[in-house]
Image (cartoon, helix red, strand yellow):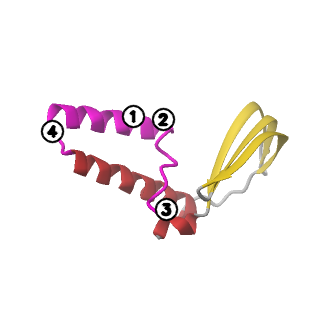
Amino acid sequence: MATFELYRRSTIGMCLTETLDEMVSSGTLSPELAIQVLVQFDKSMTDALENQVKSKVNIKGHLHTYRFCDNVWTFILTDAQFKNDDNTEQVGKVKIVACDSKLLSQ
C-alpha cells in the first residue's frame, strides 16, 4: 500500500499542496517532483510522530460515528475531553483518523 495521505489536510499540508500546485502551474516544478515532495512530507510527519512525540493523551466523548476502510479507522466524537498530565480540554466535535504506521513502510 502506498503512503497514507494523512497529513495533507492539515494546515501545513494544505499550504504545501497549494504552493506545489502554483509551482507546477508556472512550470517551475514538474508534477512528478511535486508528488515526490508530498510523499516525503507524509513520511516525515509519520517519522516525527513515531520518534519525537512522547506524551500520551486520554480521550473521552460520545462516539457519534466510526468506520474502518482500507486499514484506516475514522472516529467522530462529540463532547470530547482530551486529558494529559497537565491539561484538560473540552471540544465540541472532533474527527480522529488512525492507521497502523507499519503499513506505511510496505
Judged left or right of residue 99, residue 78 is right
Look at mark 4 in the image and give the residue it sits on.
28
Whether residues under marks 2 and 1 lie with C-beta atoms below 8 angstroms apart, the answer is yes
Q: Secondary structure at mark 3?
A: helix
**Residue appearing at x 48%, y 35% in the figure:** 11
Mark pair 1, 4: CA separation = 17 Å
Of the two numbered discs 1 and 4 on the same chain, state the one appearing first in sequence. 1
In the displayed structure image, the side of residue 89 where residue 99 appears, left or right:
left
Residue 73 screen position, x and y as percent: 67, 52
Which residue is tagged 2? 11
User: Residue 70 in the image: x percent, y percent?
Assistant: 58, 56
Distance from disc 4 to disc 2, alpha carbons, whole Å, reads 23 Å
> What residue sits right under mark 1 in the picture?
15
Vertical order, 3 against 67 (above or below): below
Residue that label 3 marks: 47
Dot 4 surroundings within 10 Å: few (below 14), some, or many (20 or more)? few
Of pointers 4 and 3, the one earlier in the residue sequence = 4
Q: Which residues are magenta?
A: 1-30
Q: Amino acid at mark 4?
A: Thr
Q: Does 15 sit above or below residue 3? A: above
Earlier sequence position, callout 1 versus callout 3: 1
Q: Amino acid at mark 3?
A: Asp
**Of the residues shown, which amino acid type is indicated by label 2?**
Thr
